[in-house]
Image: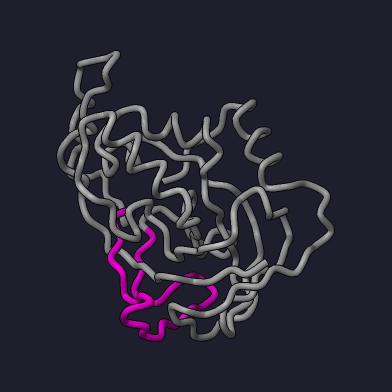
Amino acid sequence: MNAQLIAICVGQAQALFGHAGASGSDPRPTPAPTPEHLSAIRKNTISTLADPKPAAVGLLGVTGDDQVDRTVHGGPTRAVYAYPAEHYAFWTTVRAQAGQHQPLAWGAMGENLVLQGLLETQLWLGDHVYVGEVLLRVEAPRQPCFKFNTVMGFRQASKMMVQSGFTGVYLSVLQPGVITAGDSVRVVPGDRVLSLAERHALSNRTPQRSLW
């Protein structure tokens, strides 16, 4: 496996104004979130291949990244969210079909780490992921909610993430340190009892509280 970290992203808590848009089959707009619906899902890049600045990662995530509701995103078991760069082409296509043609920048999925060469189907719960000097552990797939619809600009975005399996992965931090865009990414298998894809399938058979 030849995987690489190509961007690091952080976000600050802000209210999600606007609406999620209308789908082709349902022209009704999604109601605008109220100001108390705070989220740090909107991320900005702080390190890219073109500008590879170092970023510190602690036990609770990347320095400078807000985590508004740590019962569903954040805390020790969901400290870092990583997303495969390969899925951006899919989201560009489906957003265009929904009438959203603005280009997607890294961090658009709400991820902290943009990875290239490592997909969800290659990971199992408990796998160790080395990025630079930081050691991470695979914990869970993402379960999106209406906030993802809002930032993607169409009301079916969360449903399409679930159906596609393009969920990204939540990671805990076992060894804090410094990472930089361009760092290599290496996976060391754990017990490999349950794959990330299997965990995603099980999660979507049983109703549960949505993340984000």
Q: Does residue 181 sit above or below 42 in this rendering? A: below
Q: Give the left or right position of residue 103, taking residue 136 as reference.
A: left
Q: Is residue 191 magenta?
A: no
Specify the segment rendered in magenta: 41-67
The total number of labels drawn is: 0
164 or 60: nearer the viewer: 164
Q: Does residue 201 sit above or below 58 in this rendering? A: above
Quadrant location, the N terminus: bottom right
Where residue 33 appears, as percent x and y from the top left, is 21, 36
Q: Give the left or right position of residue 16, taking residue 48 as reference.
A: left
Q: Residue at x 55, y 56 (%)?
A: 170
Q: Is residue 57 magenta?
A: yes
Q: Residue at x 40, y 70 (%)?
A: 7
Q: Residue at x 26, y 29 (%)?
A: 98
Q: Quadrant of residue 152?
A: top left
Q: Does residue 132 sit above or below 122 in this rendering? A: below
Q: Give the left or right position of residue 83, taking residue 68 as reference.
A: right
Residue most extreme to the left: 18
Q: Residue at x 29, y 13 (%)?
A: 25
101 or 157: nearer the viewer: 101
Where residue 63 appears, as percent x and y from the top left, is 39, 77
